[in-house]
Amino acid sequence: MRRAFRTRLRIIAAIVVVFALLIVVRLYFVQVVHGSAYAMRGQRQYVSSSQELYDRGTIYFTRKDGTLISAATLQTGFLIAIDPEELKDPNSVYQSINALYAIDAGTFSTAAAKTTSPYQIVAHHVPDDVGQKIDALNIPGVFVERERWRVYPGGVAAAQTLGFVGYNDDNAYQGREGLEQQYETVLERDPQGLFGNFFAELFGNIQNVVVDAKNARQGDVITSIEPEVQQKLDQALKAVNDKYSSAQTGGIIMDTATGEIVAMDTYPTFDPNDFAHGNPQYFGNPLVQSRYEFGSIFKALTMASGLDAGVVTPETTYNDTGCITVNNSKVCNYDFRARGVIPMQQILSQSLNVGASFVATRLGHEKQKNYYTKLGFGQKTGINLPGEIVGDVHNLTSPRDIEHDNMSFGQGISVTPVEMVRALGTLANYGKLVTPHIVTGVRLETGIVKPVTYPAPVQVFGPQAISEVDTMLTYVVDNNLSNGKVKIPNMSVGAKTGTAQVVDPSTGKYYASIFFHSFFGFFPATHPRYIILLYTNRPQGVEYASEDLTPTFMDLTHFLINYYAIPPDRGAYAQHP
């Protein structure tokens, strides 16, 4: 009898403890997670039951020390509405409000004339302090109500990566472009019944403490974008574009080992805080939605392929005649000049098309196709951005030599910038192909961060080929780039420039004097940390990428070395892993 009684007592006690724990957890959600919403209700200005208080998750940048910085968040203020029928003197009311917050006179007059409507909004996004001053006027027929809206504290910084929130074609208010669109189902939030009874909120949803599949996917998006690096890149891109009146200038800075992108953007761009006045032409992201013929930076990949396949070595020589005829078409060096018998290094040092063609011939069609396929060309990278397209690599299946020769120096093959940086990243990551990405985790409402995982790197080139090509690219910077004037004595840097002709879409032929300039580089070359890809489309008054992009690349390189305190890898203070 006593044993049965004790058993029942223990069961009841256990139920009470579990129930208490559930209440404590639920209180945490109500008072902490949703505390800001209830705090608003405690103020004199209430959220109208006719208006849902907008809610949405935050997108964060991540500083180098791990601190999260809001890149897309919510701002709280007020909206101003009127009941036209209650306004005794609309003009006087307008003057009183306008003295504190500028409202378009025509908008106010139109709203005030709708006497059959009891509720007309005349102003949105009114700052908190101003809204409280207007409310303090106690004007009959004027409503001052809480409002929240999307803001982007960084302005234009990474605008095409972030996207914006607006109405779509179905009149739904949701993320458009960028991460806002890609992570819509994570960022969108239900107003959570802000007008329900507190105790109903506490007990009515207590099952959510145990499991809630819908809310489990709601949260904040954490990115790898480093705000200081992003700002520096944005300034650099604008400077190049303005100086050379380019159609567009873009860049990507990526961690070579992980594929985390710390900065990416193009210029011209737009301000997501005022996208209504922006140019829709710039809303999309050309880094994933446009493709280009990148030119001679492809030679680094051609050389790596040749070295890895064993068809050439650094000591291999060839007779450079300046021009060769392939399938009745001419392949010439940029200056048409012959170099005679020279080693492989000079193909990269002097950016020789005839030399790249020599390596492509040694490779053969099938091996070249296999390497370019393993490098991911013509395939989506898997980056966390909407609208990604793939490169046009149809020439890889051509039976003619001329198409393969042209591709060896970056003509006749067009790819997206993110495809390009992924492929070039193999040269800075011991031959391994990574997945470029921006999002590192999703922070749930509980505060728990769910890491976002990506496919393991894929080995494309062997270590010997990578060591050889990286040595060659380092030689380019130390001796050839700006005649060796940009060499960093205590830091090895590998790089290559590219100058490609641009196709005339009306004829399908190349323009004679319109170019696409590209540049890539990484450092320290002995154990790379970051790779930088830059390009500028149709620059004016400059012929070669070495002229307009070298200063920009070196400036970014010095900035990153100092900002991340990257130790030297050569000289008296060299440090190696």
Image (cartoon, rainbow, N blue to C red):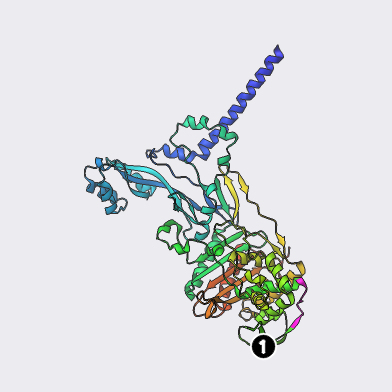
Q: Tell me the quarter of the picture where residue 383 sits.
A: bottom right
The answer to if 312 sits in the magenta stretch is: yes
Q: Residue at coordinates 50% horizontally, 61% vertically from top-left?
A: 284
Q: Residue at coordinates 58% horizontally, 39% vertically from top-left?
A: 213
Location of residue 216 with respect to 510 vertically, above or below: above
Q: Residue at coordinates 69% horizontally, 69% vertically from top-left?
A: 369
Residue 215 can be seen in this image: yes
Residue segment shown in magenta: 309-317
Q: Position of residue 483 (x, y in %)?
A: 63, 81
> Which one is in front, 228 or 249?
249
Tell me: 50 left or right of 232: left
Task: Determine whether the residue tagged by mark 1 lies in a helix, strand or loop.
Answer: loop
Tell me: 313 left or right of 296: right
Residue 352 can be seen in this image: no
Q: What is the total number of numbered labels drawn onto the structure image? A: 1
Location of residue 117 with respect to 99 vertically, above or below: above
Q: Mark 1 points at which residue?
A: 338
Location of residue 421 with respect to 450 vertically, above or below: below
Q: Where is residue 468 in the image (x, y as percent from the top left)?
A: 74, 73
Q: Please state which amino acid type lies under the numbered disc 1.
A: Ala
